[in-house]
């Protein structure tokens, strides 16, 4: 694609992946103390798909999301976006931490939160230009937040707060959405709505990567899965990854 916005966001249906927009992890090792929490992880993922990170508690799912988000330096290996280090493309990434790590009482309205998505472009104290306002409006509209835009985020339900963060990610025009346990705490209608939304966002050409602990719903929500237990146990289409044999390997003591 050659012109303006189309060049920036890889639009296109889920069946029209753009092979030049892709994430590659090559032998990534990262951790906190002496022992790596993630060891020798390699995989590739293309724009236009949803990828689940699956594994038991402590498997390294959040660690992997933090490494992708640039919040945790990796010890070795490469994280590449379109063949250059992802660290040089931080604007491309939107990261939603686990619910309990967000300060939901922070006094900010829905609209202000979504506008934060424009900060990388306009600067913290820069004024919203008409173009930025348009993008914010569109993001709010896409997530169905029009009627809530002047409410405090702290006053919203979990599902609504989730949608606010996704709207901020859209306002940022991020290609890569990193979501840590986004389905946790949602009721069934909320989960179904989020699942549909994630598939839509991927269908428009984004790469959605989310940690997920519900094996039963994973095949409906995600195209691909990574099964982790400090090391990569399996990667590929969800049905191929979540086999009894592979799942057994996640429960064997390390
Ligand atoms: P998951 O998200 O799959 O439950 P994590 O990535 O949170 O797993 O954790 C992977 C490992 O790293 C665990 O052994 C955990 O105890 C450890 N760990 C996670 N965060 C930290 C931290 N901030 N400091 C030290 N160790 C951590
Ligand atoms: Mg976690």
Image (tube, rainbow, N blue to C red):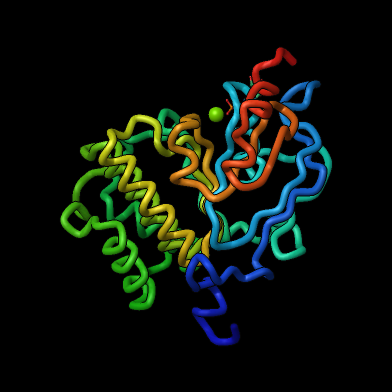
What residue lies at 40% left-to-right and 36% top-to-bottom? Answer: 183
Give above or below for 86 relative to 248.
Answer: below
Residue 56 visible from this viewpoint: yes
Horizontal and vertical percent position of residue 197: 37, 54
Q: Is residue 109 left or right of residue 214?
A: left
The quarter of the picture where the C terminus appears is: top right
Give above or below for 65 relative to 20.
Answer: above
Horizontal and vertical percent position of residue 80: 74, 56
Which image quadrant for residue 244?
Answer: top right
- Please, which residue is most extreme toward the left here? 147
What residue lies at 78% left-to-right and 32% top-to-bottom? Answer: 39
Horizontal and vertical percent position of residue 156: 23, 40
Residue 87 visible from this viewpoint: no
Q: Is residue 164 left or right of residue 145?
A: right
Q: Is residue 58 left or right of residue 14?
A: right
Q: Is residue 145 left or right of residue 125?
A: left
Horizontal and vertical percent position of residue 120: 51, 62
Residue 120 or residue 169, whichever sits in front: 169
Which image quadrant for residue 137?
Answer: bottom left
Residue 246 or residue 122, whichever sits in front: 246
Q: Within the displayed image, which quadrant is ligand 1 positioned in?
A: top right
What residue lies at 79% left-to-right and 36% top-to-bottom? Answer: 29
Count of picture labels:
0
What residue lies at 50% left-to-right and 73% top-to-bottom? Answer: 12
The quarter of the picture where the N terminus appears is: bottom right
Which image quadrant for residue 191?
Answer: top left
């Amino acid at each position: 694609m050659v012109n303006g916005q189309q060049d920036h966001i890889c639009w296109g249906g889920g069946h029209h992946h753009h092979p030049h927009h892709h994430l590659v992890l090559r032998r990534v090792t990262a951790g906190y103390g002496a022992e790596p929490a993630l060891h020798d992880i390699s995989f590739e993922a293309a724009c236009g798909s949803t990828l689940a990170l699956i594994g038991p508690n402590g498997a390294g799912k959040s660690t992997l999301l933090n490494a992708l988000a640039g919040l945790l330096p990796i010890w070795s290996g490469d994280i590449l976006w379109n063949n250059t280090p992802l660290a040089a493309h931080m604007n491309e990434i939107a990261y939603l931490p686990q619910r309990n790590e967000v300060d939901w009482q922070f006094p900010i309205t829905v609209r202000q939160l979504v506008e934060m998505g424009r900060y990388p472009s306009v600067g913290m104290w820069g004024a919203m230009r008409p173009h930025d306002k348009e993008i914010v409006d569109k993001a709010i509209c896409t997530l169905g937040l029009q009627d809530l835009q002047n409410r405090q985020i702290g006053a919203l339900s979990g599902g609504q707060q989730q949608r606010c963060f996704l709207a901020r990610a859209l306002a940022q025009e991020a290609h890569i959405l990193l979501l840590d346990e986004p389905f946790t705490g949602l009721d069934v209608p909320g989960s179904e709505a989020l699942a549909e939304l994630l598939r839509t966002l991927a269908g428009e050409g984004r790469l959605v990567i989310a940690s997920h602990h519900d094996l039963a719903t994973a095949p409906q929500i995600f195209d691909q899965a990574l099964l982790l237990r400090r090391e990569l146990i399996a990667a590929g289409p969800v049905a191929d990854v979540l086999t009894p044999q592979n799942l057994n390997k996640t429960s064997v003591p390390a």
